[in-house]
Image (tube, rainbow, N blue to C red):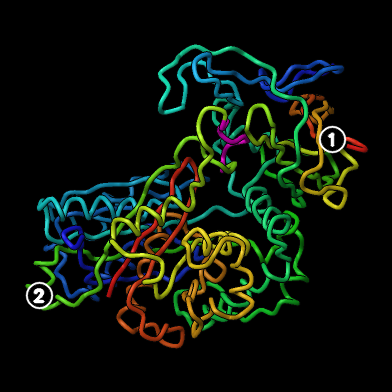
Amino acid sequence: MSNNEIAILGVGMHPWGKWGKNFVEYGVAAARSALQDAGVPWRDVRFVSGGGTVRCGYPGYVAGATFAQALGWQGAEVNTSYAACASGSQALAAARAKILSGACDVALVVGADTTPKGFLKPADGERPDDPDWVRFRLGITNPTYFALYARRRMEVYGDTPADFAAVKVKNAAHGFTNPNARYKKKFSAEDVAASAMVADPLRLMDICATSDGGAAMIVSSLDYARKIGKGDAPRIAAISTVTPTFASELVEMPDIATDSAVAAEARPFRAALPAKAYEEAGIGPEDISLAEVYDLSTALELDWIEDLQLCARGEAAALTRADETSVGGRIPINASGGLACFGEAVPAQALAQVCELTWQLRGQAGERQVAGAKVGITANQGLFGHGSSVIVKA
Amino acid sequence: MNAPIIEGLFSVDAAEPALLGSRCSACGTYYFPKQSNYCRNPDCDSERFDEVPLSRSGTLWSFTNACYQPPAPYVAEEPFEPYAIAAVKLEREQMIVLGQVVKGVGVDDLAAGMTMRLVLEDVPGVDGERVTWKWQPVEGA
C-alpha cells in the first residue's frame, strides 16, 4: 500500500542522560540536527508535531508550540500528541495524516523530555478515581508489572534469570559505541546477577532507567522528497497506534485487574500492535531485517520478539542464547542498545527508535550497523492503553 | 476493624472478606474496581450493573515482590520490609486481580497455579491504621 508512504528526509537526537536542562533544549537540538540532516529550510516546514512531555505518566507541557516558538515562529501549524510511551509515534501519525491528505508537504516531528528522579509516581492528592493513583496506594509500581510478565515466562516457558541477563549483556554491547546512548559500558551476566533485586526476578540491571533526551525527524511526501533529490530516502510504510481490544488479556499498567473475559474472548494487546503494522505495510515478519523494541525490562524484550512474530511463542530466550538477536545474527534486536543503554525519555523514545532504523537503513550506524538492513520495525507500549509499532523501509 | 485503605473496593468483614466488583446485567462482564455507568464491552450497550462480591479464591497466575519502598501515596511500614505481590486468576469472573501477599509469605513460598484466598490485614495509613485485602496461599490446596 505505497500510497500510504512518506519519506524520512532527516533525523536527529540530543544524547540521552541526566543533563539537568529544560526539555526545550533537547527538542530544539534534535530538531536542528534533523533539519540539517534533511537539508530542508526551517521555513519549508509547514507542520510541527510534538510528542507531549510526560510528568509521571500524565500529560506535561505543551510541546509542539514550544518547539515551534524556540525554532522561530514561521506560521506553521502545530500539534501536541499525548500517548504516554507511544507519544512520538502518535505525533508521527499526525504528521503523516497531514502529508497524505495533501495539507502539507514537509513536517517536523519532535519529542523531548526530562524525567524526575526516583520512581515515576502519580499526581499528588487523594484521587481514588484515578487507576494510577489507586495502584500506587496499594504498593504496585511499574516494575511490578514487568516482573509479573517475567515470572510468567519462567513458569510457562522455563526461562531463567540468566536468559534475562543475556538481553542486558547483548544490548550493552550494542550501545557501547552509540554516541547518543547514556550508558556506554559493557556488562557481564555476573554484573547483572550482582545488582540489587528490585522486583523478583528482575534486578536493577534488568530494568531501564529514566533519562532526559530528545529525538526529531523531518518527514515529507514522496513527491517533495523526489523534488529535492531525496527520492531514495527511507520511507515509513506503516504506523500502528491501535488500542487494546476488549477483553484485554494481561493486567496492564495502571490497572489492578484485567478485563473480565466472561462475555468476550481474552486477547493479547502487544501482539496486536505489530500485526496492524504488518497488515498496513503489506509485509510479514519474514521481511524484517531488525527491530527496535521497548526493553523496559530485559524479560519484556523476549515478549516483544514473540509478539512481533520473529520467532515462535516461548522461543525468544533460545534465540537470544544462540546470539541470533545480536548484530550479526539472524534478527538483531535493539541494535541501538535499546532502553537498556538509553534509559527512557518518554515522548522521545518512540521517535528515537525510528531514528535508529533510519540510520541503519541508510548504512550509517557505524559499529552497530546491521549488514544489508532493508526493513525495520519498532514496538512500544505505555500507560492507559497506548502503544505503537512503526515500519520503515529502505 | 480499621477503615479500608480505599473506600468501596472491598468489604470489611473479617470472616468473609471480598473484593467488591460489579457485573453487567446484560452481558455478564465483571468489573473491578466497580463500574456503574456504562459497560466497556464494545458489543454491549447496557448501563445497568449489580454490585457483586468477587470470588474469594483463585489460582496464582504470576507473582513478584517489591524490594524498594514505593513513593506516596503508598504508606510504608517503618522500617520498610519487602512484600510479595500476587496476580490471581478468578475462575468465575475470568479476570486477574493484583494484590499484596500476606506478611511472612515471600516469593520463595509461591508457585504459579497455587490456590490463593482473600484475607484482610492491617496496614499503615497517613493518619493511623487501615485495613487492606491480601492474598494468602491455601495450605494443602
Residue type (three-letter) at the residue carrying disc 1: Gln
Q: Which chain carries label 2?
A: A
Image quadrant where one finds the N terminus of chain A = bottom left
Q: What element carries label 2?
A: loop
Q: In which quarter of the image is residue A21?
A: bottom left
Q: Which residue occupies 74% across, 35% down?
A: B75
- Decide: marks 2, 1 in contact (CB < 8 A)? no
Residue type (three-letter) at the residue carrying disc 2: Ile
Q: What element carries label 1?
A: strand
Q: Quadrant of residue B21?
A: top right
Circle 2 residue: A228
Residue sticking out furthest to the left: A227
The magenta span reads: A252-261
Left or right: residue B37 versus residue B85 is: left
Q: Residues within 10 Å of mark 2 (few under 14, many from 20)?
A: few
Residue toward you, A68 or A168 = A168
Is A166 rendered above or below residue A93? below
Q: Residues within 10 Å of mark 1 (few under 14, many from 20)?
A: many
* Residue B6 can be seen, yes or no: yes
Q: Residue A332 carries which label?
A: none
Q: Which residue occupies 42% across, 84% down?
A: A369
Q: Which residue occupies 25% across, 50% down?
A: A94
Q: Position of residue A161 (x, y in %)?
A: 73, 66
Residue toward you, A301 or A55 = A301
Circle 1 residue: B136
Q: Is the magenta stretch mostly helix, strand or loop?
A: loop
Q: Of circles 2 and 1, which is in front?
A: 1
Q: Position of residue B18 (x, y in %)?
A: 75, 21
